[in-house]
Image: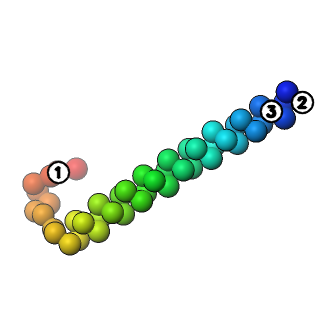
Amino acid sequence: MAEKKSTKKATKSKDTKAKATKSKTSTKAKTTQRHLQRPKPQNQRPK
């Protein structure tokens, strides 16, 4: 029984990680869209 509980916890943490990655990607897409709308000189903000 204890093992089953532990597995469930691991899955939950994995799901949270996936959610975080998804939100990160969504934010990146939004930033890209804004960048396309109002392009700025590339050399102003070096990566």
| Residue 41 in the figure: left or right of residue 22 | left
* Label 2 environment density (alpha carbons within 10 Å; few <14, some 14–19, many ≥20): few
Q: Quadrant of residue 34?
A: bottom left
Q: Residue at x 67, y 41 (%)?
A: 12
Q: CA distance from mark 2 to mark 3?
A: 6 Å
Q: Are marks 2 and 3 in contact (CB under 8 Å)?
A: yes
Q: Residue at x 33, y 63 (%)?
A: 30
- Residue 32, given in percent of the width and then of the height, sits at 29, 64
> Which residue does the numbered mark 2 point to in the structure image?
1
* Label 1 environment density (alpha carbons within 10 Å; few <14, some 14–19, many ≥20): few
Question: The disc labelled 3 sits on which kind of residue?
Answer: Lys
* Label 3 environment density (alpha carbons within 10 Å; few <14, some 14–19, many ≥20): few
- Residue 42, given in percent of the width and then of the height, sits at 14, 60
> Which residue does the numbered mark 1 point to in the structure image?
46
- Residue 14, given in percent of the width and then of the height, sits at 63, 43
Q: Secondary structure at mark 3?
A: helix
